[in-house]
Image (cartoon, rainbow, N blue to C red):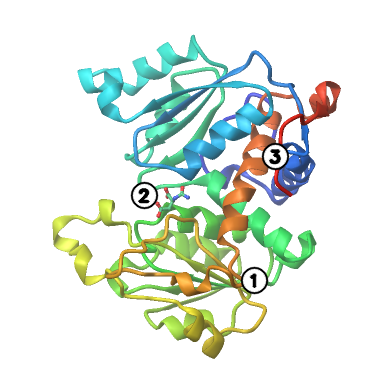
Amino acid sequence: MEFKGANILSVEQFSIEDIRTILRVAETMEPYALPQKKTRVLEGAILGNLFFEASTRTRLSFGAAFNRLGGSVRDVVGFQFSSMAKGESIYDTSRVISGYVDILVVRHPQEGSVLKFAQATNIPVINGGDGAGEHPTQALLDIYTVYKEKEKNFDKLNGLKIGMIGDLKHGRTVHSFSKLLSLFEDMKFIFVAPEQIQIPDKIVNQIKNAGHAVIQTDKLIEGISDVDVVYVTRMQEERFNEKENFSSYQGYYTINRQIYDKYCYPQTIIMHPLPRDSRPQSNELDNDLNNYKNLAIFRQTDNGVPVRMALFALLLGVVDKIQETESNVQWYVPS
Ligand code: NCD
């Protein structure tokens, strides 16, 4: 795809070559993300960071990524503090904000809403999560994480076996990540969830049509015992309707060190888009794994910054100009 000026709305827009490009650029961003060096390439540019749903890492890492490239960030957080609370439409909001900023990131509770933002403006729009729909940048940082955990060998992403566990119906990260992974070859997906909150059939069919193996089960052990990656997700409490009865799924699956040691291969990595629900009645990923080397969740969150920097640089057309304004970091940075 042509990145300059594009929107990032769904992983369905990417080819395998696009993924390769994003990972390659993300790697070049690492020194600036750490930060070992700084660049001012986006000095003067402004990001509009619009979050109409709860967020910690997505909003902050988008903001940090833009700042690390030298740009400024303006946040709108929550409907109650935007004119949408006064009845303003997505169309008007998007058109107005486009007069103030150079690029938009939007998170919104309604599926398809970020597309509406994009249709109303000529600046690039990035989907930071649209309801139960998609979360394309999370999928990109997830694939970047697997790539780094697998010795940075792009070809080793083929043939991957992955167990996805939790709320696969409402979890947009699973939707985006599974579709993105199905661009590779010879994959095996094991979707572990109670039947009522299994992954949508549409996505299963897309994956099967791309020639991959799919197993759907409600048994945790089947999803963790013969895989390269265990991808745990949160029960999406805020997306359950009254009939779906969230509390009956709370704590449905727990992975702790004992379960890992008993059932997983010693090299299996554990991922989670976070936040993990650490309330005692949920405890989907136990704290006793926190210092375990194969727990990749905090490396995964760190990876959000270089991946989002790469997207900004690609969409704003400055990939080749990063080094022009490079200088040393003056402040204390822990090793
Ligand atoms: C996810 C999301 O918002 O979809 N969080 C994130 O962005 N890393 C996952 C979740 O909320 O469970």
Q: Residue at x 65, y 83 (%)?
A: 266
Mark 1 or 2 closer to N-term? 2
Q: Residue at x 76, y 29 (%)?
A: 330
Residue at the spot of label 2? 132
* Quarter occupied by residue 32: top right
Q: Measuring 64% from the left and 56% from the top, which residue is drawn there?
A: 143
Residue 123: percent from left, percent from top: 55, 19
Quarter holding the N terminus is top right
> How far apart, in angstroms, are the residues tagged by discs 3 and 2?
29 Å
Ranked by sequence position, the earlier of labels 3 and 1 is: 3
**Percent position (x, y) of residue 281?**
27, 70
Furthest residue in direction left, as rendered: 242
Mark 1: amino acid: Lys
Quarter of the rendering containing residue 53: top left
- In the image, which disc is placed on residue 293? 1
Judge the density around disc 2: few (<14), some (14-19), many (≥20) Cα neighbours within 10 Å.
Answer: many
Q: Is residue 249 above or below residue 119?
A: below
Q: Residue furthest bottom?
A: 262
Q: Secondary structure at mark 3?
A: helix
Image side of residue 91 versus residue 248, left or right: right
**Residue, disc 3:** 33
Q: Nearer the viewer, mark 1 or mark 2?
A: 1
Foreground: disc 3 or disc 2:
3
Q: Is residue 94 above or below residue 334?
A: above
Residue type for callout 2: Ala
Q: Is mark 1 within 8 Å of ligand 1?
A: no
